[in-house]
Image (cartoon, grey):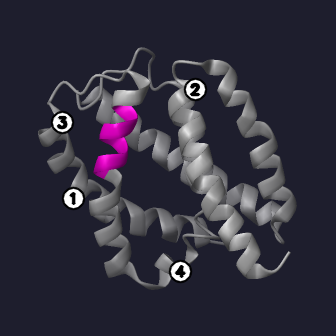
Amino acid sequence: MTHTGRVLANALWLQAGWWLCVLGAQRPWLLLLLIPGLALHLCLTPDTQGEIKAMLRVTLAGCLLDSVLGAAGVFAFDTVPLPLWLALMWLVLASGMRHSLAWLSRKWGIAALLGAAGAPPAYVAGARLAGVELPLGEITTWLLLAPIWAAALPLLLRLATRR
């Protein structure tokens, strides 16, 4: 598979993985479908060991971020520190950091804008589909997440490319 083909496949995987995770909150068997997707991702990755390390760093950082937001009352999860489907969503997102999202690592301003503009609606939509309560309300949650993600996305990209 060509580099362009791998990047496109990775972008499609990120979308499919997001849906599997969010819908898996109500139908946990869907989360099992992540296993072949992640396995295929790792098979298509030229540097499997580096990819695994990057994915673990980003996933741990993301889980910490959402755990803190949950503890602060931004989200009301049914499990502590966060549900399995959300931790798996971080793993899916992490699998794109060095691939379909890699171009953002060279464009921090655009990464910040995309983080601020893209993450809040993804969280709000995901919360609706997964049955996660937003105690502060959708608009306040959106406004709170925008600056957090303006900083988080560039930092996560940096974390993914760290050697």
Of callouts 4 and 2, the N-terminal one: 2
Q: Is residue 95 among what the camera can see?
A: no
Of callouts 4 and 3, the N-terminal one: 4
Q: Quadrant of the C terminus?
A: bottom right
Residue at point 35% right, 42% down? 123
Callout 4: 10 Å neighbours few (<14), some, many (20+)?
A: some
The relative height of residue 29 versus residue 3 in the rendered view (above or below) is above
Q: Amino acid at mark 1?
A: Pro
**Circle 3 — which element?**
helix
145 horizontally vs 10: left or right = left
Q: Quadrant of the N terminus?
A: bottom right
Single out the mark in the foreground, 4 or 1.
4
Q: Which mark is residue 103?
A: 4
Which residue is the site of mark 2? 24
Residue at point 61% right, 47% down? 16
Hey, which quadrant is residue 14 in on the image?
bottom right
Of callouts 3 and 1, the N-terminal one: 3
Which residue is the site of mark 1? 147
Q: Specify the segment rendered in magenta.
A: 120-127
Label 2 vs label 1: CA separation? 28 Å
Of callouts 2 and 3, the N-terminal one: 2
Q: Where residue 82 sits in the image (x, y, percent)? A: 46, 26
Of callouts 2 and 1, the N-terminal one: 2
Of callouts 4 and 1, the N-terminal one: 4
Label 4 vs label 1: CA separation? 21 Å
Q: Amino acid at mark 3?
A: Glu
Which residue is the site of mark 3? 138
Single out the mark in the foreground, 2 or 1.
2
